[in-house]
Amino acid sequence: GKTTTLVETILQLAKTSPPSFRILVMAPTNTASDIFVVRMKEALNKSEMHRVMAYQRSDAGVSEDVKKYCNFDRESNAFPMLPVEKLKTFKVLVATTCTAAKLFNAGFERGDFAMMCIDECGNDVEPGVMAPIECLLASGQQLVLAGDPRQLGPVVRSPFASLHGLSTSLLERVMDFPIYALSPDGKYDPRVLTMLVKNYRSHPHIIAVPNERFYGSALQVCGDPAL
């Protein structure tokens, strides 16, 4: 639901905004980033959307649908980054959070993206999320963090790193800010937070416990009973 909502938001803005409205779409992993390309390829052509890859990524796991939106060099079997002048001609750039941070080194500046979106934000370590934000987000621009702080957080194997906070995602940490807290009437401020409550995946008995423990019984079971 979260990714689908984010995809539709990006497409609506890409189609209705002025040419100067550039969107950077990110996720912690290549798999999650590729999903955006696959879901938006029918609506955005190769002159509107570009998938920025890490140079050394193997093309073996990259589908042909995604590869069409990349700069793949068959001779070197690598994904060299396009010049910044060319990258700035696309309405939508898709990258992992790690690769997105390198756009600053490629020549992008703060303010070059009108909106930055990070999906699966609750799964990434905070430095990984903060790198592109710190380098590219300017005051007054839109930052969308999509994820669920109640689900799987960052995978941190070092006890020392966990002790010092790396197992807490940026999304989980900012949810403690008063602006994102529930109001006395049990609702979030719609100006800063949207909670998706319709669940189409789980049997009512499966969702009952986490719904009560983590979501204040706000989730609505909407799945087809026949399934």
Image: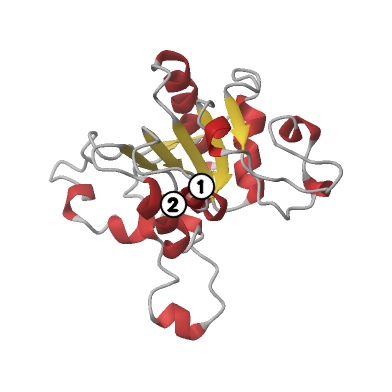
In the picture shown, does residue 52 fall above or below 225?
below
The colour style of the image is: secondary structure
User: Depth check: 156 or 188 in front?
Assistant: 156
User: Depth check: 225 or 75 in front?
Assistant: 75
Element assignment for label 1: helix
Q: What amino acid type is highlighted by mark number 2?
A: Pro
Residue at the image point whose x is 54% and y is 38% from the top: 84
User: Depth check: 182 or 194 in front?
Assistant: 194
On the image, the x and y values in percent for residue 146 come to 43, 44
In the image, taking residue 76 as reference, residue 143 lies left or right, namely: left
Residue at the image point whose x is 35% and y is 41% from the top: 143
Element assignment for label 2: helix
Residue at the image point whose x is 57% and y is 77% from the top: 157
In the image, taking residue 8 as reference, residue 144 lies left or right, namely: left
Name the quadrant containing residue 172: bottom left
The residue wearing badge 2 is 132
Disc nearest the viewer among 2 and 1: 1
On the image, the x and y values in percent for residue 90 come to 54, 27
Q: What amino acid type is highlighted by mark number 1?
A: Leu
Q: Residue furthest left?
A: 184
* Marks 2 and 1 in Cβ contact (< 8 Å): yes
Q: Using the rendered image of the protein, determine whether residue 150 is visible from the camera's viewpoint.
A: no
User: Depth check: 82 or 132 in front?
Assistant: 82
Q: Using the rendered image of the protein, determine whether residue 31 is visible from the camera's viewpoint.
A: yes
In the picture shown, does residue 189 fall above or below 206?
above
The residue wearing badge 1 is 103
Residue count near mark 2 (Cα–Cα under 10 Å), binned few <14, some 14–19, many ≥20: many
On the image, the x and y values in percent for residue 204 come to 51, 42
Q: Earlier in the sequence, mark 2 or mark 1?
A: 1
On the image, the x and y values in percent for residue 140 come to 24, 37
Residue count near mark 1 (Cα–Cα under 10 Å), binned few <14, some 14–19, many ≥20: some
Q: Residue furthest top?
A: 16
